[in-house]
Image (cartoon, rainbow, N blue to C red):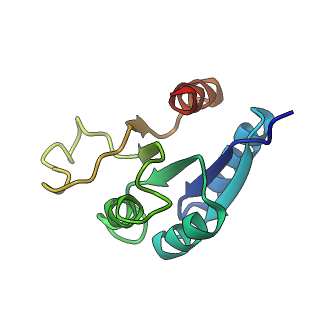
């Protein structure tokens, strides 16, 4: 039996982390958690995840983008699929929000809250590549 795929979750919302960890573990993944961008980047270096899910806004508007930049410039993170999560309704008052110009690539942007089935489906799609 092959070893479980490793997923790194980076989010400052502890409730979201725990709920999402359970969903992903039920889906057969090994899950690592980080509650802020800095520890997320450090964890990525130590566990070499197969995929990372990163919250767009943590302590600051741009923290998620900073994490993506750091992962994409590190040896362990430049090839892995990255999913960015956003709780922001881009139709609402944040319509003018533009991601930074030089945004490193993420593979998918999903909106919170996300249904468990959808999350498992999207993660599975990215890990099959």
Picture quarter containing residue 75? Answer: bottom left
Residue at the location (61% across, 53% down)?
49
Q: Is residue 13 above or below residue 60?
A: above
Residue at the location (41% across, 66% down)?
74
* Residue 58 screen position, x and y as percent: 43, 65
Q: Is residue 77 above or below residue 24?
A: below
How many numbered marks are there?
Answer: 0
Residue 96 relative to residue 60: left or right: left
* Residue 96 screen position, x and y as percent: 12, 47
* Residue 46 screen position, x and y as percent: 63, 69
Residue at the location (47% across, 40% down)?
112
Residue 60 relative to residue 30: left or right: left
Picture quarter containing residue 123? Answer: top right
Say which of 19 and 80 sits in front. Answer: 80
Looking at the rendered image, the quarter that the N terminus falls into is top right
Say which of 96 and 42 sits in front. Answer: 42
Residue at the location (54% across, 67% down)?
40
Q: Residue furthest right?
A: 1
Residue 127 relative to residue 107: left or right: right
* Residue 28 screen position, x and y as percent: 78, 35
């Amino acid at each position: 039996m092959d070893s479980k795929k490793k997923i790194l979750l980076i989010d400052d919302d502890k409730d979201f982390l725990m709920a999402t960890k359970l969903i992903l573990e039920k889906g057969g993944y090994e899950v690592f958690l980080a509650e802020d961008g800095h520890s997320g980047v450090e964890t990525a270096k130590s566990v070499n995840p197969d995929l990372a899910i990163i919250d767009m806004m943590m302590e600051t508007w741009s923290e998620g983008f900073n994490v993506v930049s750091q992962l994409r410039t590190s040896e362990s993170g430049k090839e892995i699929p990255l999913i960015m999560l956003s709780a922001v309704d881009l139709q609402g008052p944040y319509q003018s929000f533009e991601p930074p110009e030089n945004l490193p690539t993420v593979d998918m942007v999903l909106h919170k809250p996300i249904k468990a089935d959808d999350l498992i489906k999207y993660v599975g799609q990215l890990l099959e590549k």
